[in-house]
Image: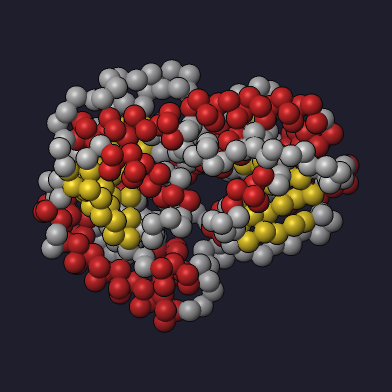
Amino acid sequence: MSRSMLVLCPYPEGVAAGQRLKYEQYFDDWRARGWTIDVSPFMDMGTWKVAYQPGRVGAKALGVLRGHLRRLRDLARVRRYDLVYVFMWVTPLGTSWMERLVRRLARHVVYDVEDNVVVGQALPRGYNPNALASLLKGPHKARFLIRNADHVIASSAFLRDYCLQELGARACTYVSSSVDTSRFVPRTQAAGGRKVTIGWTGTFSSRVYLDALRGVFQELARRVDYRLRVIGNFEYELPGVDLEVVQWSKEKEVEDLQGIDIGVYPLPRDEWVMGKSGLKAIQYMAFGLPTVATEAGMTPLIIRHEENGLLVRTDAEWVDALQRLVLDSALRESLGGKAREDAERKYSIRAISSDYRGVLDQVLGKELSDGRQEDLHGGLRRDAR
């Protein structure tokens, strides 16, 4: 049976980790199950290339205009689809009028939300490099979609519960971020005689979390010899630390992550973090890396302390944990091996695919394909209510 889906999303297909390592990975599976899928990003590739650059105001303004024109075109065809899949918002600016029109016109709406956008994010001045980026996260649009979509997909168990209990979502399912564990694999050759490398990957907007560890990295450098690899879309400096800055690219993503020995996932302890899916930790785990992470949000449900990674709270604990791993190759191997096993069993495309299928089938009035499933994270449920 053929079914049709229109995906309304912020970014072009295949470029943004929040989309690429979430629902986009399942397009082939959905097509194999009879779905025809059309993707309509708000940003075209021209806008994407300038969106996170300083300046370029004219190009960004034109990109926003093109995005809104594209959405007006989408309104004219929404009725033709069996289901509209919205990721984050329909448009980034203004009120929820466009979301309301889509909801009125669409037969069925699935809303996929990540991070705790319903409370907003307070970044220090300068961490959004342009006005467009700072406007791309607003709580009013998310609140409307959560309350009015046929089904909500939440990026964390905590966000799922908030959507159901506080915002009155009709149905909400926690679907974990996931990775292609056939592509994200541990390196096959030993590192040789090079320094132990600690790694972090992220974007300009998440650099604030990396900055929280500046003092940790500097103190660690006074204790042990190591290298820090920062993989992102910005330049970075850190006096006193052997630092390697790598500009992220899809083509070299696997190779760059295979070049690190320890992954770090620093987080603040606030409401925003309660909606984060733990994607960075899951990425590191797929590469067989021991991860050191702040004990906040979903990390205690993903990382089991001293089994597949290390959880920390204070700067002193950060330094001690990283020092242990730098000096103890056997501990790195043990934690990394367990992390890889968990990534394959819990966070691979194969493991998560049935969760998405269940949501799509339920929205179209069918029985959940796999019934009510016990969540893999120690008893929490992914299914609705």
Please say if 86 is above or below 34: below
Q: Is residue 152 left or right of residue 179?
A: left
Please say if 256 is above or below 70: above
Please say if 109 is above or below 95: above
Residue located at (36% from left, 68% from top):
44
Q: Quadrant of residue 33?
A: top left
Residue 90 spot, x, y in % from top left: 27, 57
The outermost residue toward the bottom is 58
Which quadrant, please, contains the N terminus? top left
Q: Is residue 93 visible?
A: yes
Residue 251 spot, x, y in % from top left: 56, 56
Q: Is residue 124 visible?
A: no
Q: Is residue 266 left or right of residue 364?
A: right
Residue located at (24% from left, 71% from top):
69
Residue 163 spot, x, y in % from top left: 32, 36
Which quadrant, please, contains the C terminus? top left
Residue located at (29% from left, 33% from top):
357
Decide which of 325, 266 is in the foreground and name it.
325
Decide which of 295, 30 is in the foreground and name it.
30
Residue located at (69% from left, 38% from top):
188
Residue 107 spot, x, y in % from top left: 12, 46
Decide which of 36, 15 is in the foreground and name it.
36
Q: Is residue 230 left or right of residue 60?
A: right
What is the basis of the colouring in this image? secondary structure
Q: How many labels were placed on the picture?
A: 0
